[in-house]
Amino acid sequence: MNAKSALTVALAAGIASTAAASNTPTTLGPTQANINKAGHIYYNVSTGERVVTMFNDGQTAPADTGASEMIWSALVQNACEAQGYITSYFFGVDNPGTTSLSTNVTNMDYGDIALDTVVDCIQINWVVAHPDAWANGTDSTSGVVGIEELAGQWMVWDADNGRELNRSTRLPLVDFLFFNLPGNTPDNVTAGALTGWTADVDLVAFGTSTDLSFEIGDSDGDCQTAAFCNNDVDTDFDGIGDGVSIANADRDFDGLMDSDLDGDGLFDWSWTVRFYQPGIGNDFDSDSDTGSAAGTASDTIGISFGYPTGSAVDNGDGTWTWQIDTSVADAGTGEEDRFAIYNPPNSTGAITYNGGYWFGGFACTGGLISTGGLGYTPPAMFQFVLYGPSTGNPCPADFNGDMNLDFFDVSLFIQAFNAQDASADFNNDGNWDFFDVSLFIQGFNMGCP
């Protein structure tokens, strides 16, 4: 394998069922580690394009076509940085040999979003201890090989706020199985650190008719500009769709729409992740190689904590609250200091609810680990980002605003690029480089609508 074979995807329909259990969150400990971010992967599931970019090259990967913008985000950041903490935490979703809870389980996080929201790109992440095979090459990106049969399965769900009660309308929207995930880099292995990766998963092939975008919370039977949505829900469980949109479904017949279980007027949705260790019989890439020996306790893989735009608020009683700034367009609305865990699929393929978990209550008062303290207690929120079609400039290459693309637009782009003006940062990564030029050229060649 080479850099372009690391991180491969398989798409499938998602099916899950649940069993009732207590709604009381149970304290669970986060995992503390020295985590170094290695790089970012841009992956287009429609075309198979992969761009692996290493952060130590001073670059980040391009954001799909420049035509998307964040519409819901919980980005990786340190919730207690203002109080002097520098500790990195992650949650080990799969840590073989340690506890039954963290092996082959499904981790669920959830939030709220406006009805009829179109998603054309998502961002995921993983933190990994598995040493990557790492092939030598002249460019550091050529070193990314990937761990044979180390896989992660991410799913997005309609009408779900993480509860085990009144979940009658939970329906899958999209199911991504990524295998041969990139692992821990040699430098981090030597330093005793873990490696963090992020990936932007683009659902639309730019300039083609291929489209795997989806709509969350369909309310009118129209998927808008998305390729698919849950607009024909089987409300009476007879196996036949009844022409009811997911936002209007009441499958427990209590007279209440099941898509707003917390009653805030927004649509409930969730996302899940489950990891698969090498050596347990999976051969996702059909090469007759199921990977190395089965995972051990040293082969942890998990996800980073992420927080919506906001700030840490001291409650005055030893606990803190992460106050989400809902004025921000991409605020991670509805994300809570709680997540859910589901047991591995049983003999019928169903996953059962294990419980609601947190980390004992968010607090920035544990004391610095460097001075003998326990560190802060992070809120139980995880990194995830949704992107949707941009509602901004419909023709971003039109720099002079005359809806014509010509020499004047090229000249103005070059001026803005040389001046490192935000208008020339086409992928919004804070850098002015080849990716921005490439995206400008693509937009210029497409012309104005």
Image (spheres, helix red, strand yellow):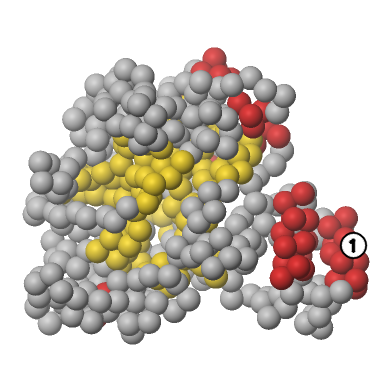
Which residue lies at the image location 41% right of the left edge and 42% below the top edge?
A: 178
Q: Is residue 49 left or right of residue 380?
A: right
Which residue lies at the image location 51% right of the left edge and 20% below the top edge?
A: 133
| Residue 135 vs residue 408, the one in the foreground | 135
Total tally of numbered discs in the picture: 1
Which residue lies at the image location 30% right of the left edge and 71% below the top edge?
A: 230
Q: Position of residue 323 (x, y in %)?
A: 43, 59
The residue wearing badge 1 is 415
Quadrant of residue 148 within the rendered picture: top left
Q: Is residue 318 visible?
A: no
Q: Is residue 401 left or right of residue 78?
A: right
Q: Position of residue 61 (x, y in %)?
A: 64, 47
**Type of amino acid at the residue the image marks with label 1:** Gln
Quadrant of residue 162 within the rendered picture: bottom left
Q: Position of residue 181 (x, y in %)?
A: 45, 34
* Residue 229 position (above or below residue 182): below
* Residue 47 position (above or below residue 55): below
Q: Position of residue 439 (x, y in %)?
A: 72, 59
Which residue lies at the image location 74% right of the left edge and 74% below the top edge?
A: 447
Q: Is residue 398 left or right of residue 27?
A: right
